Image: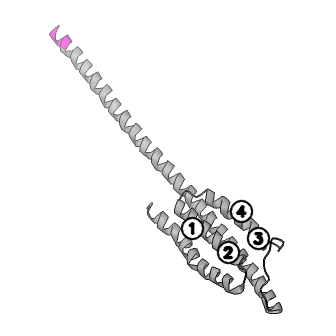
Amino acid sequence: MGSAIFGFVGVLLGSLLTIYKDRLAARHDIKIRGKQYERDRQAARDAFQREKTLALQTAVSDLLKSLYEELDRMLAEFHESGSLPARQWETPTATGWSAAALQLQLSAARVLNPSLRELAKKVERAAGDAIWAPDLATSRQCCERLKPLHARFNDSPNRIFASHF
């Protein structure tokens, strides 16, 4: 009878140890899956932000392309007439300007980094100032102000994404 009790206690202890080991393994698996889930979420968020940042860079480039095309048109008219045509409300919108400005605003709204959004808005304001400048000298000053802003804007994503890796 003593050996039966020892056998029963052995089976009971063995069962308890197996259950304990299985629970530890299950907790470990849950912890690993949770960490993997967080890594996957962060990777998806980073990919989304890279995509939206690239879209914002494209929108800024399209806006500047539209600006420079309009300035070229205005300069051609300046060379013909001797005066820069004053932009007014009735003046035709620069080709692609409105679409580019709207795309820039939409793209900026999807970028989570506030400093990058603000820099894009500064580029947009400087471009608008250049296109609506009352004279050639003011337009030239606005374009000069725009160059370093654009360079800073294009360098910003590199600094932002470098901090993620």
Q: Nearer the viewer, mark 2 or mark 4?
A: 2
In the image, the segment drawn in magenta is 1-5
Tell me if 10 is positioned left or right of 44 in this view.
left
Dot 4: element: helix
Image spot of residue 145 (x, y percent): 59, 79
Q: Which residue is mark 4?
A: 102
Residues at marks 1 and 2 touching, judged by CB atoms closer than 8 Å: no
Q: Which residue is mark 2?
A: 129
Image spot of residue 121 (x, y percent): 61, 66
Q: Which residue is mark 3?
A: 96
- Image quarter of the C terminus: bottom left
Tell me if 126 is positioned left or right of 86 in this view.
left
N-term mark: 3 or 2: 3
N-term mark: 1 or 4: 4
Dot 2: element: helix
User: Residue lying farthest top?
Assistant: 1
Q: Which residue is mark 1?
A: 119
The residue at 24%/21% (across/down) is 13
Numbered circles on residues, count: 4
- Dot 4 alpha-carbon crowd within 10 angstroms: few under 14, some 14 to 19, many 20 or more: few
The residue at 67%/75% (across/down) is 129
Q: Nearer the viewer, mark 3 or mark 2?
A: 2
Q: Nearer the viewer, mark 1 or mark 2?
A: 2
Q: Amino acid at mark 3?
A: Gly
N-term mark: 1 or 2: 1
